[in-house]
Amino acid sequence: MADQEVEIAVIGAGIAGIAAAYYLCVEHKRKSVLLIDSRQPMTYTSAQSGDNYRNWWPHHTMTSFTNDSIDELDRLAEESNDVFNMTRGGYVLATRQDDVTGIIESIPGDIDVAHYGDRELIRKTFPALTTDIKNVVHIRRGGDISGQQLGQYMLERLRAAGGRKLQGDVTAVESDSKYRLAVAGADGPSTVTADVVVNAAGPFAARVARMLGTDLPLKNIYHQKIAFEDHLNAIPRDMPFSIDLDAKRLGWSEEERSMLAEDPDLKWLAGELPSGTHCRPDGGPHGRWVKLGWAYNKKISEPQEDMANEPAIDQSFPEIVIRGAAEFIPALRPYVSAPPPRFSHYGGYYAMTEENWPLIGPLDNKGAFVIAALSGFGSMSACAAGKLCAAHICGSPLPEYAVDLSLDRLTNSTLLAELEASGNKGLL
């Protein structure tokens, strides 16, 4: 490959890197922006997205951040004739608890929310949920999108504005007055010289940061999902994204539970499992597919170049998540004994900070920036994240939350203590 010189090199062509390049090219009119990735765009972590969005967070900083991102999604949906199929069904938070005062009080006051505490009204409004649900909190500003179509639309726009893509792996970075990136590609090695470098490397962001002389407090946790054709029509096509807020025990037989309890590797399945089972229809009102997820894995793992080799992949996950969801949505129970014949089992890395907030802004070295740690909320926050990163680079006015989402928050002991004390990271 031939050496080249650009103004801005963006390392990583997932949704975060694409969004940063989009706002640099389209909003700030930067003509010399290069996306660098060894893979095709949107084919690693971004390809595993749940494609949901929400402004429901336990802290106003994240609420403001995602509200801005949803504003941008609304704008782009109108501009593109809704090429990424944005729905607006909201998020349903369901519980068997009698008292939801704590849940209600944990929701920032600027979130549009409805509370259903009448069980008869719950059954009428959300008929798929198990009848022992006593309270439902409906977060209004939420829904789903096609993250792939959003990324493709941004790619087309940034290319039309002069942005380019280079397929290759950044293996080293040197810097003095400029950055020199060693890139290994299919056609051989090359060097990219840039004034500005953006680290948008997703699960590999810590590795790239070390090349730039910075340590980032990032960890990667592998989470799985399944999607399947709902040939039993168990899930209403208009059901909002629905989350079970209660811990649960799976519906094993006594014999199965006893066998699990005797196995050191599986005994955790016989006990109480955490909350967070979630479900939604996929493919719009006329689709047939359903998505299920449950972020119960807590193990930190190093990202694999080939995600199929990820050691945290759990082949029993489809059965576990169907059993968990069936405790929440009884119409799914037939799938426990007769699994759906057509389904997809997939997963991706939640690249995250301890407090589960993103890192967006300048790094220690002049001209180096990061847009990373979009743990489980990459698709929904990409617009605000890319816009914020571009504003940092171009010296534009920054939103009020910019400091809290930058590396500067790591020196704010008061904020970090507040987040640690809350115990709620908004993780799904």
Image (cartoon, rainbow, N blue to C red):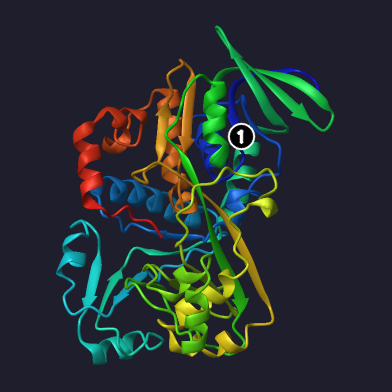
Q: Is residue 242 left or right of residue 101?
A: right
> Which residue is pictured at 43% across the width and 41% down the height?
385
Q: Secondary structure at mark 1?
A: loop
> Residue 413, relative to residue 316: is it above or below?
above
| Quarter of the image where one finds residue 39 | top right
**How far from the left and from the top, in percent, is residue 276?**
39, 67
The front one of 46 and 293 is 293
Q: Is 199 left or right of 132, judged from the image as shown? A: right
- Residue that sits furthest to the front in the current view: 262
Residue 315, position as x, y percentages in the image: 63, 67
The percent position of residue 107, horizontal first and vertical second, equals 22, 60
Q: Residue at x 52, y 42 (%)?
A: 16
Amino acid, disc 1: Ala
Q: Quadrant of the N terminus?
A: top right
Q: Residues within 10 Å of mark 1 (few under 14, many from 20)?
A: some
Residue holding disc 1: 161
Whether residue 281 appears in this view of the structure is: no
Would you say 423 lies left or right of 224 here?
Answer: left
